[in-house]
Amino acid sequence: MDTRLFSYINWSLLGCVLLLFGIGVVNLYSASGTRLEDGIAVSGFYQRQLVWGICGLGCMLAAMSFDYRRLRNFAWPFFWITLILLVLVPLFGKSVYGAKRWISFGAFSLQPSEMAKLAVLVLGARLLARDGQPLGWKNFLSVLAVGLVPGALIIMQPDLGTTMMVLLILGGMILFHGMRGYVFKTCLVAAPCAGAFMWFVGMHDYQRQRILTFLDPGNDPRGAGYHILQSRIAIGSGQLWGKGFMEGTQSQLRFLPERHSDFALAVFGEEWGFVGCVTLVSLFCLFLLSIFSSAVQAKDRFGSMLVVGVFFYFFWEILINMAMVIGLMPVVGIPLPFISYGGSAMLVNFTLLGIVLNVSMRRFMFKT
């Protein structure tokens, strides 16, 4: 790789990522309830997160090391491989909490639904980059099918949150590209019908219960509403400045469930308060702005659509997780990027950032 490309790296984006990752590790250290026994630290999730982060940095460097335009040639093969793995999940996947989402290869486990986000993003970018004209019905349906097919396989696992993410990412890319007016109006009319179909046919009972609990968490405070109520208590008790590092009672006394993953933000809010949360949100805003600037500066449509897809990937995950933690959305199991614990998600996050940096580095290397 030409070393001159490093002078074009989006350093603000890279700095935001490393800072967010550092905050996430420190937050996981607290969420793990790490303590000293005879001077030796009892390990928690933060150690594994560090390992996954180092592996993720390797994936990021690998994603930066080649011309991103080559991804066009791998879009379809990668998509088909992902579909095959999704088909194999119900047959050979291991069950965790009643859901089959992982395929085990000895000591290594793979979550194909995380791969699906990347596969749909790359193939969607290739299809949308074919021309700059707003999408008519033919092109719109062909692009939409790229998200609907893996989405149908993922929701069977069942995993409503990831299915929603796949469709939201692709939907954001389509909106950015543009649609014919009649296509857009038809989609607006069809959206409520699709929602009704999902409610009566596509959702399991526990998923419908999550939405009902979101509307009235106090209706089942010891059951389905427990997560949201404890999360609200944790964040509210942080008040303005927070209780201090590892001083949060909800997290340290184990009242807060899933404090290392879905509700990691609640741990942060309890310990660092309103000021800390505003700082974290501001850092995420700078992070998203840096990604969007790379999309605007890209020198070809494929590169621009790739980065737009990454932008919507992080935008929706950040928005949904934060809204979920404070009770503005139902609990759907979507982690907060770089803050929540997760190996597969960490590898995908850094790989996507590597693609953004790849496009940013090569924005002056050729003309369209």
Image (spheres, rainbow, N blue to C red):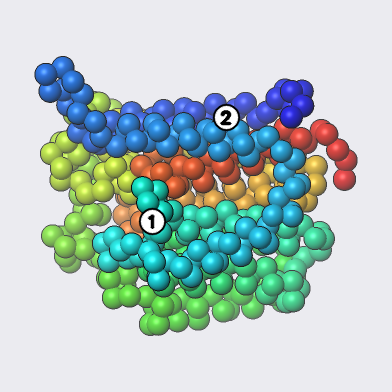
Q: Assign a secondary structure to mark 2.
A: helix
Label drawn at residue 361: none
Picture layout, residue 42 above or below residue 170: above
Q: Is residue 185 left or right of residue 72?
A: left
State the residue position of label 1: 104
First reached walking from the N terminus: tag 2 or tag 1: 2
- In space, the residues marked 2 and 1 are separated at their CA atoms by 32 Å
Picture layout, residue 212 above or below residue 25: below
Q: Amino acid at mark 2?
A: Leu
The quadrant in which the C terminus is found is top right
The residue drawn where x is 72% and y is 43% is 68
Q: Assign a secondary structure to mark 1.
A: strand
Q: Is residue 318 left or right of residue 274?
A: right
Q: How many marks?
A: 2
Pinpoint residue 366: horizontal percent, then vertical percent. Answer: 86, 38
The quadrant in which the N terminus is found is top right
Give neighbour class at mark 1: few <14, some 14-19, many 20+ (Cα, 10 Å). few
| Residues under numbered marks 2 and 1 in contact, where contact means CB atoms less than 8 Å apart | no
State the residue position of label 2: 14
Camera-near label (2 vs 1) is 1
Which residue occupies the foreground of this view, 249 or 114? 114
Q: Quadrant of residue 9?
A: top right
The residue drawn where x is 69% and y is 54% is 74
Pinpoint residue 365: horizontal percent, then vertical percent. Answer: 83, 34
Q: Quadrant of residue 121?
A: bottom right
* Observer able to see residue 339: yes
Picture layout, residue 157 above or below residue 227: below
